[in-house]
Amino acid sequence: MIARGSTLFGLIVAATMTLTTAGCDDGPSGVRFHAQDAYPENLSAWRLHRLEGDRLILAGDVVPYDLNAPLFTDYAQKLRAIYLPPGTSATYRDYESFDFPVGTIIMKTFFYAKGESSDVVRANYVWQAGQSSLDRSQVRIIETRLLVRQSDGWDALPYVWQGDDAVLRLAGSLERLEIDLADGRRVPLPYIVPTRNECAACHATDHSSGALQPIGPKARHLNRGYLSGPVNQLTRMMKEGRLSGLPDLAAVPASADPAGDEPLDRRARSYLDINCGHCHSPKGAADTSGLHLDAATSGSRALGICKPPIAAGQGTGGRSYSIVPGDAEDSIIVFRMKTNDPGARMPELGRSLSHAEGIDLVGGWIDGLAGECIERDGPSLTGD
Amino acid sequence: MKSMSPMGLPVLFLLGALLAGCSDQTAAPAGTASEAETVDTPYEDRLRLALETAQPGDVIEVPEGTHQFTRGLTLNTDGVTIRGAGMDRSVLSFSGQIAGAEGLLVNASDFTIEDLGIEDTPGDALKINDGSNIVIRRVRTEWTRGPHTENGAYGIYPVQTENTLVEGAIAIGASDAGIYVGQSKNVIVRDSVAEFNVAGIEIENTVGADVYNNVATNNTGGILVFNMPDLPQEGHSTRVFNNRINGNNTGNFAPPGGAVSGVPAGSGVIINSNDRVEIFENEIADNRTANVLISSFFSASYSARETAPHFDPYPETIYIYDNTFSGGGDAPDREELEALRTALFAEAGRLPDVVWDGIRNPEKADAAYAICLNNGESVVLNVDAGNGYENVRVDMSGHNCSHEKLPEIVLATGG
């Protein structure tokens, strides 16, 4: 039993702490952190950005970042940014996402280059605009997802843009668009904004605990210059006091840029890590498959080489193994990356289109793998 | 719980006022005003919002009617019940689904779903991934066009669950398994019906399952007890009893490549690579390949010659007794078996009730690991599949035995 005096003292301390980490106007730009039971209906209430005419401009202490390898999301462009409460820093971790303080907000805004109308967007567009702003006369902004670090963990909040603000949509949304692809085709794009629970499908990286984690802000993904600029993002975070514990950069892992010029093996594994590894890991939701595609996996069978499927259903595409060395076409992974059947495609969420460049990368890697899967040599009872 | 000090109240009030002052516009709790239900809101959106904002203890009622869905549904909150007005009255139809690998995906514990139908999902109908105390009661999963390769894979699919009860369910038309329990512990499947699936009821990599009072008919294979390699848990200790497993002769319509694509049409019960399995007091009839098939990993379609490290590929400690067998074995869906049938049992003959691939662990030849058969006149046919069917024989000397009976499964939930 705690004495009354200390109870009161504890409350005051708690109140002070809350105000420090989650109070009003605590950042120079006025970012406002909201309690779990009072998430605002409008994105603007977080004050992570402001609009000046057609320009969406991030608040001064909402710092944009990018990744060595992005998750493919129907060719959407993404503006990613992190807000840390003043005076706080994230703690470096070698493999897992950094440990962020209570009050952190991670913001990801999905947008496309505008096409000939507001519902036609373009895929063949590389965003090179300002480092912390978007020009809405040039792009259609679809959604902004927030990951919000509360005292008991992360919450995921999907906001969908409507006019000059975005609206909280815990049940997600379906936006029916068309998209002009790089090869000249125009195809329907049923763009799915995930629900809050679907956010957890990827972000509950330890599926048994169900706790959400950021996926992008890991050492190996952030280890680069922002928009390929000269200053390493990690070094900058450290210098600005927003990251603690960063070792010498030579000791920090770095994922390969899938579109870069590193060896094919590193680029393909980097692609699989960011696109598949959050579920396909020994603790992820897809551990039921025994197929692990995260960066730490080294065993060839766990990686899918000559591994039969477990419960893939029509996801096998009639193929016998996740990966057949030297034969991308006969590998289940490539089939599932190509198909758009909701019951067979991978990833299960986050795409309605297939990613031609990713398929070429992973397929090319598989085609270059040496070895073969040993076939059965006799008739069998319950076999084909 | 500490009692609130009188002096604490103003402090809390002050804190609340400060926090409230942060918001310069209406702050709504989860499930915001604009998402609130109105009479015009499609039921798809209303049910999805109920799942997204569910609190432990919630009972979500699904009204009568057939409700259409374009996207899958996900529940992540523990302690929720979803209840319809009957498996044919409250139906979630996913025939127009464009996204989501399941109709309903549940990542939660203490979950009950009852009196509801789920139809025509492109992927799995109902998947429960990683939870304890799961009750699936009087739920129907069905692909309404009947057996078809492009049907979704699994009807009722709890995986990595513990204390799981499936009862009074009906599963029809799955292109893999109607009721599939994977990598789970302490499971009961009872009083359910599986029809026109590739596998009717499949227990895979599961430790402790009782499967009883079910009907498995018109599937490719009736009831399967399997172990697959490369998974965190190998299964054992399954009892299959008091079931009716008859006429499972539907041609295999699974997409090639998966484990069940190798199941011969006409299989009553198949035990593959699993240990400590008890098959008793069932009525097993008219399954035209064999009423009971027992095989090692080496005889499975998904078997390469190399096995995964540490995986036990052999079916061991199998006990079959007091079943009522009739018919079956008269038209095996395998050339080799059909050739054996006519060669050994004449044109009108049938294979014995139990057919075994004959592949056993040479280091575990003693009776403790044997396939024991204590079932009247029934015998075991050893097809010697490991040696190219060279020494096919009925030799009961290794099978006239018994094993200690497995204990009853008792669910922690008292189910």
Image (tube, coloured by chain):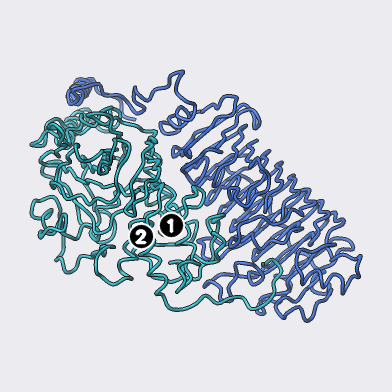
Chain colours: A cyan, B blue
B180 or B135, nearer to the observer: B180
A313 or B12, nearer to the observer: A313
Q: Look at mark 1 in the image and give the residue it sits on.
A: A337
The type of residue carrying mark 1 is: Met
The type of residue carrying mark 2 is: Gly
Q: Earlier in the sequence, mark 2 or mark 1?
A: 1
Where residue B403 appears, x then y in whole percent?
A: 74, 64
B27 or B263, nearer to the observer: B263
Labelled pair 2, 1 in contact (Cβ < 8 Å): yes
Question: Residue at (19%, 20%) from the top-left corner?
Answer: B10
Of the numbered discs in the image, which one, if any, rests on residue A358?
2
Crowding at label 2, few (<14), some or many (≥20) Cα neighbours within 10 Å?
many
| Callout 1: SS | helix
Q: Quadrant of the N terminus of chain A?
A: top left
Where residue B71 appears, x then y in whole percent?
A: 47, 38
Q: Is residue A143 visible?
A: no
Question: Residue at (69%, 57%) from the top-left corner?
Answer: B252
Task: Decide: is A257 above or below A279.
Answer: below
Chain where mark 2 sits: A
**Are both tags, 2 and 1, on one chain?**
yes
Task: Decide: is B274 above or below A163.
Answer: below
Q: Quadrant of residue A357?
A: bottom left
Q: CA distance from mark 2 to mark 1?
A: 8 Å
Q: Quadrant of residue A62?
A: top left
